[in-house]
Amino acid sequence: MIRVIQYSAVFFWMLCLHGLASAFGAPKIQDLPLSFYLPSPPIQLEPSWLDLSTIPSQLRADQEFPEISRIFDLVNESEFQRAYVEASRYIDRHPTTPFQEWLYYFKADVLYRIQLKSPRPQLSLALEDYEMASRLYPRSEFLPRALYHMGLIQLESGHHVEVEQIASRALTDFPTSDLVPMFSVLSGEQAFRAGDYEKALREFSLVIRRYPRNEAAADSAFRRAYLLYRSGNFEEALKTYQDLERYHGEAFRFLRMEANPSSPKRFLDRIFFGETLFLTERYQEASDVFQNLGNRFPNHEYAPLVWIRFGDSYLGMQQFVAAQRIYERTAQDASALDQFRALARIQQAGLLQKRKVPSSGAAARGLLDEAFSIALDANERELAALALAHLVEVNLSLPNFPRAKAILEQLRDEFPEHRNLAWQRERLIFVLETEIVDYHRAGDLLAALTVYLVNESRLSGQFRNVDTLLKLADAATDLQLFEKATDILNRVIYIESSDQARQKAFLKLVHVLVHKGDFRRASERLRRFNFAYPTTPLRYLYEKRWGDLYKGLGNFQRAVSHYERALSSAERDGPALHSIRRIHMELGRLYQELALPLKAVASYQRFIGIFADRERVKLSGLEFTDADRHLVQVAHYRVADLYFETRDFVQALGAYRQVLMNVQEEPFRSHAQYRIGEAYLALNDRRAAVEAFRELKSEDPQNLWFLAAQAYIESVNLEVENEIRIFQ
């Protein structure tokens, strides 16, 4: 707290300094743009589904067409899962059907629609079906449509490089397709979402120039205008909106609310159009747009924000009383979001400061205090920081430097990241310099030096979502950053209010200790966990951690026991059981260590069985990652090797054939083919062995399995030529 100034000369100097700072370009507060409160307007990138009209006319006379039509009718009845299953079965039962090409692409469409309607969509599943269809029929007339859908899926998945590759391929391979404009829009949208706004602007401008009459040009114009608005080029953004009138007059009239004013479509585009008018100082036109939006959609989530901008438009036209009434109404609207009630108070305080009526400073300070409290309670930290910034300026204008300094320090310590950091830094330096001068003039040099030293450092704070913290802890554990993982998990344990989240964090902490090899502390914590949570719903994770611990200690028998209990505990909880599915792989390996090959085989086969029915997995929404795919291949290989090692060569032959069906990588395929030959030799079937060895092909002449197979063939030939037996 600055000491009360006793000398009138010093107080007068402070006022003069504040006035000079304002006169010579002191930094100004940057208010939050409308885009801070609103999401970017959605672009009209809708899927283009296959229907019966896309089937070639000559096939519609085919005797199978009624059955195909029946399957398609399931889509019309919104029976998408049945349609998917029926289409899959039809392909399996009729491998030579002339409708196979259409059915593969239709099936991918249906799975895409299923995932779009799912509360937890797994779009990658539909992507796999599209990729399969495109591999089977790379010259299909349906491929451009499939590529477009693949691009949409990759776009929603955030795979921007893949989107660009798909769009480039489509534009190169299908330059005459009706979907060419949409591929260009897709390319622009992926650049937009990837944050490459310059490229996005180029792509959307290209669509407008090349396809001015296409509907894609209208969508591109809306996105281009938004990009220009974001970059601060408001005049060019307005021109882009106005240019719509030439080829898309209906869209422009819709934007101005002269056509279909009650339609909720493009609500956000209308808001940003009004905002562009406002920022180009066309206040009357902007007020018309905002007033119409507010009246037509009074219950919309963003209606209070629309009314605030309506008030800002009146403020721009110097109609202070009207603006004041609009702000007051929005500030007192109990149905409005907290962030908008806070913003209305900030705008109201700014209006009072402009009018400079008696006691306006005190009234503005009260409004800003309210705005800060509302924003902070709603966790709108950027808005809370903005309220504090305006509160600083109000206190400086009163002048109340001690209060301004206290608020600036609060802003610095509690809000390390906000858009007015440059302003904050300059204002804090100004106030601190004023305080230092005060102490210096008063002769308190130690206090003046302390102010400088204390403010050399800057505090920082963090906010983290619990789920994110747990994932970060997992990543840190995997990277063997055990201390960082421990810090994160301890924070969750001590600050999180959710009991189950704390339990998860506690068990993950045990996982970290096991990875570190600190088995004693891990076992102690597990016993404490069992004492504290005897009826925990995470019993399956608790048992799994014991299994991990005993595996680390080399006590495989006890590890197997706990892993089996973990599976038993999760037996009736499908998601929980699926989350620990890889225990089957661990059990298989441990059974091998315990010389229990048949149990190991059964365990590996259970893991394979989880994902055996790919169609069911896709429809159920169960997680199936690349790591799972790899482990399925590993499981197939281990089953085959176990049969071979136990000399069950008949079973080994079947198992290695399964490996060949499921594993594409070399040298594993070569090894499997080689083992098939060895199995036939063990069964004393020379002819089949030679045939198996001959089927072993390799592009690598140094492939060891290929060389060994060739050696076996030569040896068997020697046996025949010389009537001797090399292999017994």
Image (spheres, rainbow, N blue to C red):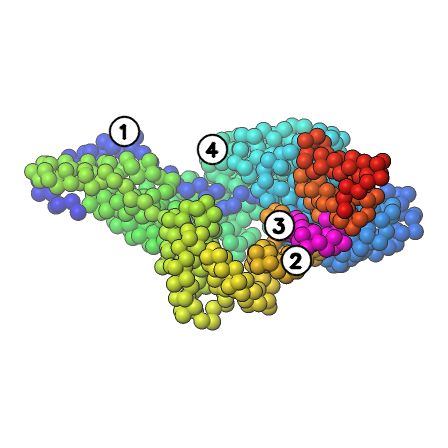
Mark 3 sits on what residue? 631
x and y, in percent, of residue 182 in the image = 68, 37
Q: CA distance from mark 1 to mark 4?
A: 25 Å
Instruction: Examine the structure image and report whether residue 238 is included in the region drawn in magenta.
Output: no
* Dot 4 crowding, Cα within 10 Å, few <14, some 14–19, many 20+: few
Q: Residue at x 85, y 49 (%)?
A: 95
Compare residues 137 and 260 and report the one nearer the observer: 137
**Amino acid of disc 2:** Val
The amino acid at mark 4 is: Gly
Range drawn in magenta: 633-658
Q: Which residue is mark 2?
A: 601
| Alpha-carbon span between mark 3 and mark 4 | 51 Å
Q: Which residue is mark 4?
A: 232
- Percent of width and height locating residue 187: 62, 34
Chief SS of the magenta region = helix
Quadrant of the image occupied by residue 199:
top right
- Distance Cα–Cα, label 3 vs label 2: 14 Å
| 377 to the left or right of 261 | left
**Which is more N-terminal, label 2 or label 1?**
1
Q: Secondary structure at mark 1?
A: loop
Q: Is residue 61 left or right of residue 315?
A: right
Residue 24: image tag: 1
Q: First in sequence: mark 3 or mark 2? A: 2
